[in-house]
Image (cartoon, grey):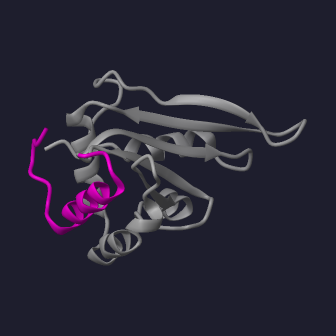
Amino acid sequence: MRLFHHAWITVYAKPEDNFQRVKETLVKLFPFNLKEEKLKVEETIADIDEIRKFSILQVHLEKAHHLNAFLKSLLSKLTPEQKAILNKQKESRLDSALHFFIRLDKPNLMELGEHWLTDAGNCFHIKFLLAAYPATRKAGLKLIDTLFSQDLKEGED
């Protein structure tokens, strides 16, 4: 069963951040080798002001086996309490286009290697496009319920 059509994992590397460390932490989120899977970290430079710039790093997943492997890995690193929070907050985390949003605290992930949910801006942004049928909010919410009430099966595409 395909749960998502796409996923975008994004992080901002500010001037005060260690760019290489931010990128390494992003790459470690994936349970597969990005290079071997012919995926890359896209980098965009944005201006803070006339002098300072920051980098936006993003990985886009669209193949079912990448999406399922990433999701299974992510869910294995979240506590049951965090999964319950995601399910409880599903209404506010799902937009009208069926994008489901998760934010992981950047300092905790980079310093401790721990996956903690946050509502703050200093985070790793994860945006999933749900593969709900029909493509309605009601079907999307039901898919989220299903996702957090059962474990993903290994190798499911």
**Which quadrant of the structure image shows residue 30?**
top left
Count of labels in the image = 0
- Name the residue: 20% across, 35% down: 65
Q: Magenta stretch?
A: 134-157
Q: Residue at x 45, y 62 (%)?
A: 93
Left or right: where does residue 16 sit relative to residue 18? Answer: right
Q: Is residue 90 left or right of residue 56?
A: left
Q: Quadrant of residue 117?
A: bottom left
The residue lying toward the viewer, choosing from 37 and 138, is 138
Q: Residue at x 31, y 75 (%)?
A: 84
Q: Position of residue 111 (x, y in %)?
A: 51, 61
Observer-nearest of 147 and 137? 137
Residue at 56% x, 62% y: name it: 107
Q: Is residue 87 visible?
A: yes
- Residue at the top extreme? 38
Answer whether residue 147 is magenta in the image: yes
Residue 113 vertical placement versus 48 (above, below): below
Q: Is residue 116 placed above or below 19 in the rendered structure?
A: below
Q: Position of residue 67 (x, y in %)?
A: 27, 40
Q: In x, y percent, where is residue 27? A: 42, 40
Residue situated in front as seen by the camera: 103 or 89: 89
The answer to whether any part of residue 76 appears in the image is no
Residue 96 magenta-drawn?
no
